[in-house]
Amino acid sequence: MIIYLNVIGLYLLWTVQISTCDICSTCSCTIFINEEQEINCHGKHLANNDMLNFDLLTLSNHQILNKLVLSKNNIVNLPRNLLKKLQFLRNLDLSENIIEKIYITMFIDLNSLENLNLSKNSLKTFDDSLLEVLPALLSLNLSYNDIDSIEHLMNNTITKINTLDLSHNNISSLPKEFSASLLNLQYLDLSFNKIHSLENCNLIHLHSLKKIYINNNFIITLDMQALPKTLIELHSGYNQISEILYNLVHIEILNLQHNNISALHANLITNNLQSLNISGNLLSDFPNIISESLKVLDISNNKLTYVPEVISIKNFPLLFQLDVSNNPVENLTINSDLKLNLFVANKMNMLKNIEKDTLANLRSPSNDCINLTISNNKMLTFIHEDALRHMNLCSLDLSNNQLSYVAQKLIMHSSNFTIYSVNLQGNPLKCNCTLQWMLNDLVPQLYTTQPRLLDDLRCAWPSQISNIRMVHWYGWKDQVFCASTSILKENLTMNVASVVTTEVIHFDSSTGLLIVVGIATTVLTLLIVGGIVWTQKVAIKRRRINRKF
Ligand SMILES: *[C@@H]1O[C@H](CO)[C@@H](O)[C@H](O)[C@H]1NC(C)=O
Ligand SMILES: *[C@@H]1O[C@H](CO)[C@@H](O)[C@H](O)[C@H]1NC(C)=O
Ligand SMILES: *[C@@H]1O[C@H](CO)[C@@H](O)[C@H](O)[C@H]1NC(C)=O
Ligand SMILES: *[C@@H]1O[C@H](CO)[C@@H](O)[C@H](O)[C@H]1NC(C)=O
Ligand SMILES: *[C@@H]1O[C@H](CO)[C@@H](O)[C@H](O)[C@H]1NC(C)=O
Ligand SMILES: *[C@@H]1O[C@H](CO)[C@@H](O)[C@H](O)[C@H]1NC(C)=O
Ligand SMILES: *[C@@H]1O[C@H](CO)[C@@H](O)[C@H](O)[C@H]1NC(C)=O
Ligand SMILES: *[C@@H]1O[C@H](CO)[C@@H](O)[C@H](O)[C@H]1NC(C)=O
Ligand SMILES: *[C@@H]1O[C@H](CO)[C@@H](O)[C@H](O)[C@H]1NC(C)=O
Ligand SMILES: *[C@@H]1O[C@H](CO)[C@@H](O)[C@H](O)[C@H]1NC(C)=O
Ligand SMILES: *[C@@H]1O[C@H](CO)[C@@H](O)[C@H](O)[C@H]1NC(C)=O
């Protein structure tokens, strides 16, 4: 650390001594402890002054420069010899400029360049001979340009590049020779383009490809035969896929969310698949498949009217995360045994009740706990007090349902509720004596461990206290919910002011709530009186001042 500070210190001295037109007077220059140098000129308006044409040429003073950031400078063209002597440069960031065309000769001497970022420019075409003049290039970012064609002009077909980001362009196809030259490519992002068919992209030649993003395009048929067999992750959400042909044995992560899939063929789920996201499709059924590896399954936003019983420990022994949200399910009964770490059932607009046995087959894994989220269900008014009795919960989210009552037994069952988080916010809770336990046990617990779960924990009833947060009564000794109800019972239409007057007179019989309301009223009255007196004083003073002039 001390050595590092010394290096910086010496370096600062050195920069000060250098002529004022040196690039370090405008950009920030850093030497790292391993002697690597970095010059960062992000957002320095270099294109608008002479800096770019003159000072950048002094970069030859920094021949061991490893990283050069020229992003966000309105650069249209780089001076021809700018990068000539930077033979140690490994990272070059030219993103967020307005470069329309790449002149290959500019890059010819960058023999060490590994990462080139041309993202967020105005490129219309991309000529792959750039890959040829940069022999060490590993990663190229061309995202957020206007590229609609990729031209194959390179002679040599061996490139080292392993990461290519072409997302957010206007690409509908890739030339065959181009993809055939990407022998080492492992990561390809083609998302947010205009691809209608995978065949047009000649992806089958990418013999090392592991991850591909083709989400947010216009693909109708997902023909997996057009993809290399090496693929492990396929991100193909937000297309118009209605048909899936074949499958790929090695795929571990398959994202198909927001497409037009109405049926899944049994062969889709291979024995290597670990995560399947088929949220936002038209599924009304689920195939009876076995997968020894499936861990995460998202079938939310479909047309399922029940939780498919083929989703079970028997078929998916490793499954630990299941999302069934936003399906037209009226009866949430889990019909097969499941042991999960996370179960999510949100936005089920037809779900009204959760009975004693509804979740009986859903368990937490042995020696582990389950995060249970059943929230934003606008018809859900009832959860049986024994519905979760058999689960070892790590968190319970019942927020934004229509629950007016939550049994103490539901929350504080056999497991030690003090160690998990309970979210009951956004429910129209009826704060009568049966919910006094929340003030006694839940509120103090959340107050110390998860105070943000008290932000929207409110009473909806009785009307006198509707919308008041429960934390308002934190630390009160009285059984507030019990007391107020008994008083309110005497006269439901009685307004708060009249309660205060009667109760303040019979002070000994008043409840904590009423005392505080009484004190509050007194304070308010004093303030009002004080306010009147003060206004009058000010008015008098003003009159006096006015008289003076
Ligand atoms: C550009 O890419 C480089 C490395 O490839 C990275 O360090 C940098 O953060 C990227 N810039 C932007 C704006 O994403
Ligand atoms: C490419 O750059 C964009 C920002 O301009 C960034 O969001 C993206 O992550 C980069 N891609 C890679 C593969 O680093
Ligand atoms: C490809 O070969 C041609 C002819 O041999 C040559 O003129 C051209 O410069 C080469 N392109 C690259 C990028 O090396
Ligand atoms: C994308 O390409 C189409 C033609 O294929 C063209 O009409 C459109 O203007 C292009 N869009 C952009 C943003 O360049
Ligand atoms: C989605 O599929 C249905 C039939 O399954 C079809 O009627 C509809 O046109 C398709 N929509 C799109 C956008 O392809
Ligand atoms: C599935 O995709 C949806 C939509 O993109 C996303 O919100 C959700 O988090 C994904 N599910 C999983 C388990 O990643
Ligand atoms: C829900 O379905 C289960 C079996 O699938 C059945 O036993 C139960 O009675 C149903 N509950 C309601 C309320 O219809
Ligand atoms: C369950 O919730 C706990 C805490 O709320 C969190 O640390 C853990 O990552 C969650 N597990 C899963 C599988 O989501
Ligand atoms: C519950 O857990 C808390 C904190 O871990 C601990 O202090 C308390 O003794 C436990 N109570 C019971 C009944 O196990
Ligand atoms: C409180 O309200 C619940 C349901 O809203 C009702 O079942 C219960 O009898 C009430 N308890 C008391 C003490 O008024
Ligand atoms: C109940 O409230 C009504 C209207 O505020 C009032 O007229 C009546 O006297 C009250 N009854 C009791 C017993 O306080």
Image: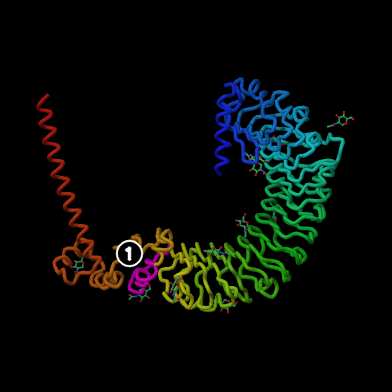
Q: Quadrant of ligand 5?
A: bottom right
Q: In the rendered view, does 176 fall on the left or right side of 31?
A: right
Residue 85 vertical position relative to residue 220 in the rendered view, above or below: above
Q: Quadrant of residue 325?
A: bottom right
> Which amino acid is tagged 1?
Tyr
Residue 40 vertical position relative to residue 188 in the rendered view, above or below: above
Residue at (80% x, 36% y) in the render: 128
Q: Position of residue 264 (x, y in %)?
A: 72, 63
Q: In the rendered view, does 258 fall on the left or right side of 464?
A: right
**Is residue 96 among what the camera can see?**
no
* Circle 1 Cα neighbour tier, 10 Å, few/some/many (<14 / 14–19 / ≥20): few
As helix, strand or loop, the secondary structure at mark 1 comes to: loop
Q: Position of residue 227 (x, y in %)?
A: 80, 52
Q: Position of residue 253 (x, y in %)?
A: 70, 58
Q: In the rendered view, does 433 fall on the left or right side of 199?
A: left
Residue at (61% x, 29% y) in the render: 73
User: 460 or 77: nearer the eye?
Assistant: 77
Label 1, on which residue?
A: 474
Q: How many marks?
A: 1
Residue 479 vertical position relative to residue 349 in the rendered view, above or below: below
Q: Could you tell me what secondary structure mostly forms the magenta stretch?
A: helix
Q: Position of residue 404 (x, y in %)?
A: 41, 68
Look at the image and give the residue range highlighted in magenta: 425-444
Q: In the rendered view, does 79 fall on the left or right side of 22?
A: right
